[in-house]
Image: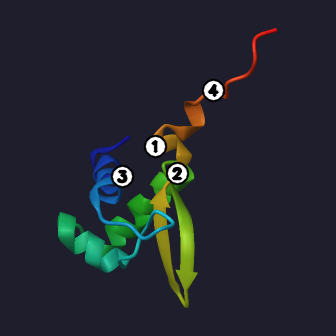
Amino acid sequence: MTANQRLVVMLYAMHPTDRAGAVVETGATLAALVGMSPTVFSRTRRQVVAAGWLEESDRLAHISYYRLSEKSTGEDVVVPLRRAT
């Protein structure tokens, strides 16, 4: 991951979320928080989504909201328990 990609993932990990785990802020607002231009933030977020660290949660009109994916929360590495035979 690049430094910008890590920054975007950490921003989503530390920002308050709704019940579905989505960060309900526009990309422009989030970009301003970390000092990125909205264009760079959007491009970096697309890269992070493509890598599987974020996923789209909701879409209202033309605004998409994102949340951490199972890959970033570690949920995809949990092995289900089963009864020993």
Q: Are marks 1 and 2 in contact (CB under 8 Å)?
A: yes
**Callouts 4 and 1 close, C-beta under 8 Å:** no
SS of the residue at dot 3? helix
Give the number of the disc on residue 73.
1
Q: Secondary structure at mark 1?
A: helix
Marks 1/3: CA distance? 11 Å
Figure quadrant of residue 56: bottom right
For the point 48% across and 48% down, which residue is it?
53
Which residue is label 2 attached to? 69
Q: Which residue is mark 4?
A: 79
The residues bearing labels 3 and 2 have C-alpha atoms spaced at a distance of: 10 Å
Q: Quadrant of residue 17?
A: bottom left
CA gap, disc 4 and disc 1: 14 Å
In this view, 37 is above or below 70: below
Checking the image for residue 9, the label placed there is 3
Q: Is residue 82 above or below residue 42?
A: above
Residue closest to the eye, 66 or 50: 66
> For the residue marked with disc 4, what is the amino acid?
Val
The amino acid on which the numbered mark 1 sits, given as a three-letter code, is Thr
Whole-Å distance between the Cαs marked 1 and 2? 7 Å
**Residue pictured at 35% horizontal, 77% vertical:** 25
- Name which residue type carries label 3: Val
Of mark 1 and mark 3, the one earlier in the sequence is 3
Between 36 and 64, which is closer to the camera in this rendering? 64
- Is 83 on the left or on the right of 12, as rendered? right
Front disc: 2 or 4 = 4
16, 10: nearer the viewer = 16
